[in-house]
Amino acid sequence: MRFLSSVAFRPLLRLHHEVKAKGGRVAVCHLSPDVTDVLHLTQVVSSRGPPTRRWRSFPDRAAAVASLRQ
């Protein structure tokens, strides 16, 4: 993800709530440094720590998928 406008936050957070209500988790990967900074500052994403954070960030798709299988 190279760019994320503020307009996209609401649908993404709605997605998170719907996925969480069904017992799922959201993992993101390949975020640009700018998007990573924004999502970390807003505490939407975490690249470490417990999976209780909203989303987990991973460097690539394989790592993201592997984390969701655990």
Image (spheres, grey):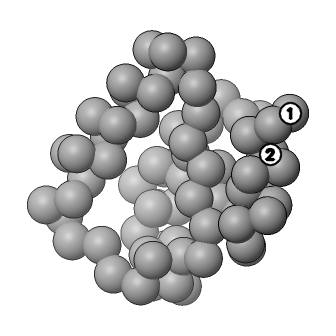
User: In the structure shown, which secondary structural element does the residue marked by tag 2 occupy?
Assistant: helix
User: In the structure shown, which secondary structural element does the residue marked by tag 1 occupy?
Assistant: loop
Q: Residues within 10 Å of mark 1 (few under 14, many from 20)?
A: few
Instruction: Say the numbered circle drawn on residue 70.
Output: 1
User: What x and y, as percent, mark residue 25?
Assistant: 59, 33
Q: Residues within 10 Å of mark 2 (few under 14, many from 20)?
A: some
Give the residue type at disc 2: Ser
- Disc 2, disc 1: CB below 8 Å? yes
Residue placed at 72% from the left, 56% from the top?
64
Residue 41 visible from this viewpoint = yes
Q: Is residue 45 above or below residue 32?
A: above
Nearer-the-camera pick, 46 or 29: 29
Quarter of the picture holding the N terminus = bottom left
Residue placed at 61% from the left, 50% from the top?
27
Quarter of the picture holding the C terminus = top right
Give the residue type at disc 1: Gln
Q: Quadrant of residue 24?
A: top right
Q: Is residue 69 left or right of residue 9?
A: right
Q: CA distance from mark 2 to mark 1?
A: 5 Å
